[in-house]
Amino acid sequence: MLLVYSDLFRRKSLLVMFVAWPYLTTAFMLIFGYAVGSPRVFTERVGVDPIQFMIVGSYLLFSIMTIVDDIMWRPIYDEQLGTLPYIVSSPTRLITHYLSMPVPRFVASTVLGATAVFPVMVFSRGLEGLLVGLAVVLLSLISATVFTPLATAIGLSLYTLGGESWRAINVIRPLLLIVTGIYYPRWLMQWPLYLVSSLMPPAHCVEVIQRIVVGLAETYTILVSLTLAVLLGVLYSPAMARSATAWEKKKLRVGVKT
Amino acid sequence: MARGVLIWGWQVLGEAVVAKDLTKRFATKKRMGLFRSYSEYVDAIRGVSLKVKYGEVVGLLGPNGAGKTTTIKILSTLLLPDSGSASVCGFDVVREARKVRRNIGIMLSVEKGFYGRLTGRENLLYFGALYGIGRTELERRIRYLLDLVGLNELGGSDRLYEEFSLGMRARLALARALLKDPPVLLLDEPTLGLDPPSARRIRGLVRELAIKEGKAILYTSHNMFEVELVCDRIVLINKGVVVAEGTPEELKSKIPNVRTLELHLRSFSEDLLSEIRGYGLDVQEPTQSSDGLYVLRILARKPEEIVDDVLRLTASRGIDVVKLRIEEPTLEDVFVYFTTTEGVERSGAQ
């Protein structure tokens, strides 16, 4: 909590960016979209107006990716700051430490939902928009949670194989973005991409959120998708544990930088 | 309770840290052009053994690259040795790393190691939670430690770490090392870059922790003066090997010509130098002082026994002796003796 909130509240510019970010991203996407396409066509194809879709997408992007970033960037950050030796030499297991890092973000993410998603949804849909907004925020938290094992496994495996480098992470992040279907609904994907995205736990939650926003949600589909997401999250957990162990072993073999 | 009994047992036996024949080799990449590279191996430490008792401060002294930090990292479970063994409070650093971590406090770098956007107190809260200390006990302990290291009087409790001076950072680092009240402290150059008052405060605290609280402290430093003040025993390490070990006085007695006869001469001749060397005395090339006098230094075990002979030699050449004094050896002499090529050859160390 201390780390997350000290950053947010002691840097006013960061706090402003935190609140404005979904709107800025949405504005960028809309400007680009209006320049090359038609909002009417978008609405006909996707099923909802682009503003609602993009604001939800931007919020999902933020809430899922920042939590993933917390896990992937933290080892690099700690090594640069010189705090890594004290974390490694603490009695707390490394994996427990890094997995608990995103927890404060959940709270911040929920607040962001209140400032980004709710206003747009209520403005567009009235009271129903409040329920939709609540579903979006709740499901995005589930989405981020089930993504954690896979994101951790990918991040720590990269670190073990190639060292702690932000370059590798910067290549992986956009790819993860595409396959989770945040800006491109899964039901519109070509089958190869659809297949790959099926292996991503958050992709199923994102699909549920999008179906709710678009009005295509059925109870059966929601239940199946959420079950798949949770199952995948559980399935990736052993990989997460092994990658953490491998990374820690490598750090101890070459020595933690001081 | 079992842990307490085990630690009590070791305290009775006296040895908190035992390292035996530690070795560590690192692979480094050497580049050949843009695409090709090859691995080169560096022996960071070879067969390092040392012990630290409870209530004792042991200094680990050596030039840059000698293996001090490698040794400290192995003992603090941040690095696995290639061979050898080490234990802290009876727990093996490799097989029982988690138990070792509960019993050590470490200080590895003075200028970093904390989160800049948190205050001193908040940083300690963060690390205390990481160490598994309960909230109430942690708050109490932080209040005590901030007073002990003098951070409260400097306003460090509620100031952001990024605004701390180097002296304040060192104090906070020591406070963190003491958070768990560990029986063993591993301090890597804890006063590096500090001003004299801050360095003195840290040194005083270290001595107090050993004497009053019976902590076992391993302390690395380049500063000979400080090591002599703080440490009960010194382990001298060079090129990965322990070359000497003992109290400061024992180490000084190990170098053959321990004392120096220093003469300030109004003039000088090479013949004088040859004649002094002809007596079998170890004499260095003269230097000139700021007042234009020639300074001649003769190394001897008992300089007072050769003073008459030397004065007779200078008088016979018509050379005036303006000043004469006998110098006691310093730890720096010991350090240079055991770590320079000449000294290593003389000592017969590998």
Image (spheres, coloured by chain):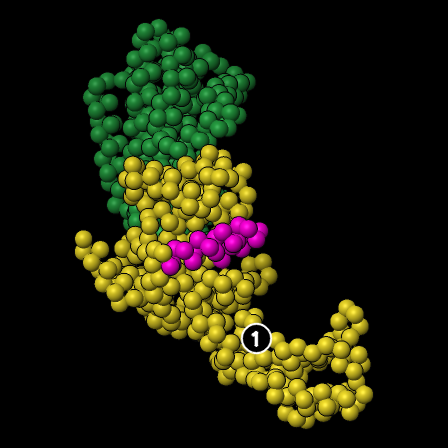
Q: Residue at x 50, y 79 (%)?
A: B253
- On the rendered structure, is B53 left or right of B350? left
- On the rendered structure, is B240 left or right of B300? left
Task: Depth check: give the residue in front, A111 or A192.
Answer: A111
Task: Depth check: give the residue in front, B71 or A96.
Answer: B71
Kindly indicate which chain is depicted in yellow in the rendered structure: B
Which secondary structure class fits the magenta region best? helix
Q: Residue at x 54, y 46 (%)?
A: B166
Is B197 located above or below residue B313 in the figure?
above
Q: Position of residue A131 (x, y in %)?
A: 30, 13
Secondary structure beneath label 1: loop
Task: Depth check: give the residue in front, A12 or B164.
Answer: B164
- On the rendered structure, is A133 left or right of A7? left
Q: Which residue is mark 1?
A: B329
Q: Position of residue B156 (x, y in %)?
A: 48, 38
Magenta range: B189-211
Crowding near pointer 1: few (<14 within 10 Å), some, many (20+)? some
Is B253 located above or below residue B123 in the figure?
below
Q: Colour of chain A?
A: green
Q: Position of residue B276 (x, y in %)?
A: 69, 89
Q: Which quarter of the picture shows residue A238?
A: top left
Q: Amino acid at mark 1?
A: Pro
Question: Is residue A254 one of those drawn in magenta?
Answer: no
Residue A57, visible in the rendered structure? no
Is B251 located above or below residue B182 in the figure?
below
